[in-house]
Amino acid sequence: MTMKTSSDPVSPQSIAAEFRTRLAASLEMLCGAQVDVVESPAPSGISCEWRAHPLDTEPASQLFTGAPEIIGRAVGARVLSAAGLDDFTDEDVSGSYTEVLQSALSAVAQYLSRALGSDVALLETTVRAPDSSAAFEVAYQLQFEDQTLSPLCFGVSPSLLQLLAAQTEEAADRPAPDRAVDPPPMGRAPANLTHTGTEVDDLHRVLDLELPIRVSFGKAKVALKDVLKLSTGSIVELDRSIHDPVEIIVNDRVIGRGEVVVTEGNYGVRIQEIVSLGSA
């Protein structure tokens, strides 16, 4: 699969910013509450449990997360409580915290895929500390309405830094594309095209039309005999991972993709990509 390379330079700081944004969205969606993820001073003398999140890049590279055990327990408990559970085990708490991290890190892998021009997948997580003297690292605070948790650290391995540096050098060596002709200013027609007042009024009436927007979580093909067996509690597996973006559809055409969020008690979609007509 060939992907379009982003024109923006990719840096450890931009990857960390993507992680921070996606982490906040993941926390809000799974905890059902607003949370701010803000950068904080690097921790000193605090014991963190570090996790390595390998990527299937060449050369092999990794992302790292680290936090005191109490943060994992607090976040995991919030997720389970938001789901309406009161009685849960330590394993449930740990799994819920891992789900929050995996959701944010999967989005970072998609960001790297777009930026590097090739698919980047997140592999199985391991418990291992990074070489902090060689890897980029940043710390964050999780600010809930009733609690502040810190630090939650995010790091990039030296091999990923080298991959980013090589990609930047390659981009710098490419010839500059031909300069596109700037479009005419808004509200002014090109010199060879004029509109009558009636045409403008008709355009305004069209722009006021309301179009239905649908969000597609996925689809599945099920044999008729299996459809007849469906009942309350049955599960139909869709062709989309929980980490894949959902599709935003207008008049049966995909116009964008995004992630599901919770805002003011309602579901919503945070747009991650607007699809061009040619690629839709």
Image: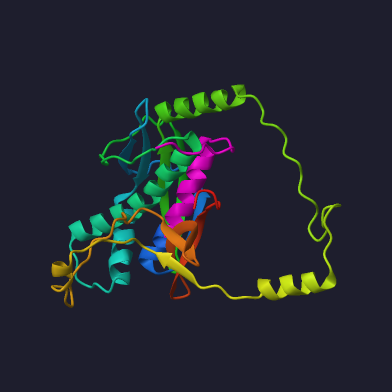
Quarter in which the N terminus is drawn: top left
Splitting the image into 4 quarters, where does residue 220 fall?
A: bottom left
Spot occupied by residue 244 in the image (x, y as percentages of width and height): 37, 53
Q: Is residue 265 visible?
A: yes
Q: In this rendered view, identify the residue nearer to me: 172 or 74.
A: 172
Q: How is the image coloured?
A: rainbow
For this view, does 237 lie left or right of residue 39? Answer: left
Residue 70 in view of the camera: no
Quadrant of the rendered image containing residue 180: top right
* Residue at screen point 18% across, 78% down: 232
Residue 61 position by quadrant: top left
Q: Does the segment drawn in magenta span residue 10?
A: yes
* In this rendering, position of residue 79 left or right of residue 142: left
Q: Position of residue 263 (x, y in %)?
A: 47, 70
Magenta residue span: 1-25
- Whether 217 is drawn above or below 39: the answer is below
Residue depicted at 72% across the width and 70% down the height:
203
Q: Nearer the viewer, residue 151 or 179?
A: 179
Q: Is residue 101 above or below residue 2?
A: below
Q: Residue at x 29, y 64 (%)?
A: 77
Number of numbered discs visible in the structure rendering: 0
Nearer to the camera, 180 or 59: 180
Of 90 and 92, the residue lying toward us: 92
As drawn, the residue found furthest toward the right would be 191
Q: Give the residue displayed 44% in from the left and 76% down from the top.
A: 265
Counting from the top left corner in percent of width and height, residue 67 is at 35, 47
Q: Is residue 100 magenta?
A: no
> From what the image shows, is residue 89 above or below residue 107?
below
Q: Position of residue 145 (x, y in %)?
A: 46, 68
Residue 165 falls left or right of residue 151: right
